[in-house]
Image: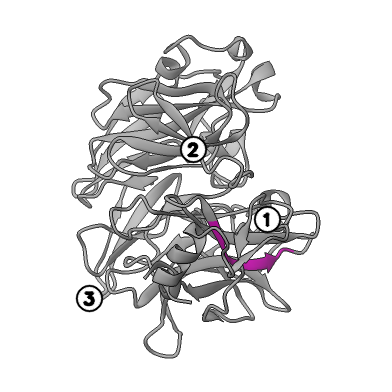
Amino acid sequence: MKRRDFLKAVTATSAGCLLNTTLPQSLSAESVDQWSLPTRVITTGPKHHWFGYYDKWQFDPTDRFVLSNEVSFEHRSPRESDSIGIGMVDTGEADRWIPLGTTKAWCWQQGCMLQWVPQREHTVLWNDREGDQFVCRILDTKSGDQRTVDTPIYSLAPDGQTAVTTDFRRIQDMRKGYGYAGLADPHRDELAPDDSGLWRVDLESGDRELVFSIAEAASTGAGNPSMEGAKHYFNHLLVSPDGNRTIFLHRWRPDGGRGKFRTRMFTIGLDGSDPYVLDPSGSTSHFIWRDDEYICAWTRPEGQPWGFYLFKDKTDEVEPVGRGVMTKNGHNTYLPIGDGTEWILNDTYPDRDRVQTVYLYHVPTEKVVKVGDFPSPRVYTGEWRCDTHPRYSRDGKTICVDSPVERSGRQLHLIDISEIVG
């Protein structure tokens, strides 16, 4: 079925290609039948491969080279001595593995922040540990030239020269699986330190400036009763498409850090100006910038059910997205097709049959297209679970997911969705 036929079908009163049966337990909507999409696994054992989070550039500007982490074990926490490989797959040459380096600063959910640098055709970066500090390696994959910046990074601005970051030592102290082993948080006995928080980094000079502290976040806005005696930290930073602002999640754990975490979503200028509590609900989870002004996030706004909502930055405007359709939390992005607002790529966590579903949501017609089901054996739980974290290619026509393969552990899967999105 071609894209024009799909659009015609989903808007028709009687659509022959639509199934009236129930989707997997983690979705709740009428669905287009799963297409026979070209799919292949592009990494192989005996080592295991994965990329991690869903909001980084995994594909190079030509969509030929696909970045990956490589590890020799699974199903336990990383230790200080554990080193993993960094490499890329050449999909234009029989999926050849090309080693690029190693790192001792990594976690199961987000890897080592490995990604292609915007505005640089051949440049990648990742975090590492060197002595008593975390650092960032920047590599030209064509020349082999490498340099080190004396700070780890979290998210890059579109100019490829600016980054934002926070303290991975504190993240590790607060929620293992997202920080890095090997270095202790120097502020571990402080509830809301004033010299730790959000830094802006110059990737050329390596200089960094603290632009907003954890203490400032804890005292900004109306607050929440659960903050009393809570321990605070930042996580999940992402710069806006125009490079002017960044999102970060302000999280706190009551009872001095022993309770279950709560979350507020902030946006702020890269210079620390104009901080704004965009979602004060305490419930923000996965999010993505749709464009320079709007953010789509899974949350539960006051008086509203759990769901995906579209927030307009620096305002109290919020509206549901995919209500009754995208009914479960997932890792959501907008495909760069058309004006960039037509297609949402998303996934689900394992249902009771341990199946994760990757799907597309067509915003104009409010229909779901199931891309694929990926089994996740029960051993993939907790800190070392293997979320699919679907990521798209630069042209938006290919998806890469992380998922276990029988007898090979987690590996990278490529899915061609060009017939769906055009």
In the depicted view, which residue is nearer to us: 84 or 234?
Answer: 234
The circle on residue 143 is: 3
Coordinates of residue 275 in the picture (x, y in percent): 33, 21
Q: Quadrant of residue 393?
A: bottom left
**First in sequence: mark 2 vs mark 3:** 3
Q: Quadrant of residue 396?
A: bottom left
In the depicted view, which residue is nearer to us: 349 or 320?
Answer: 320
**First in sequence: mark 1 vs mark 3:** 3
In the depicted view, which residue is nearer to us: 355 or 97?
Answer: 355
Q: Residue at x 56, y 32 (%)?
A: 299
Other residues around mark 1 within 10 Å, as few (<14) / some (14–19) / many (≥20): many
Q: Amino acid at mark 3?
A: Ser
Query: SS class of the residue under badge 3?
Result: loop
Q: Does any portion of residue 85 appear in the rendered image?
A: no
Per the rendered image, the range of residues in magenta is 368-376
Q: Does any portion of residue 345 appear in the rendered image?
A: yes
Does residue 236 appear to the left or right of 143 in the view shown?
right
Q: Residue at x 63, y 56 (%)?
A: 30
The circle on residue 297 is: 2
Q: Amino acid at mark 1?
A: Arg
Q: What residue does disc 1 label?
A: 385
Q: Residue at x 36, y 46 (%)?
A: 155
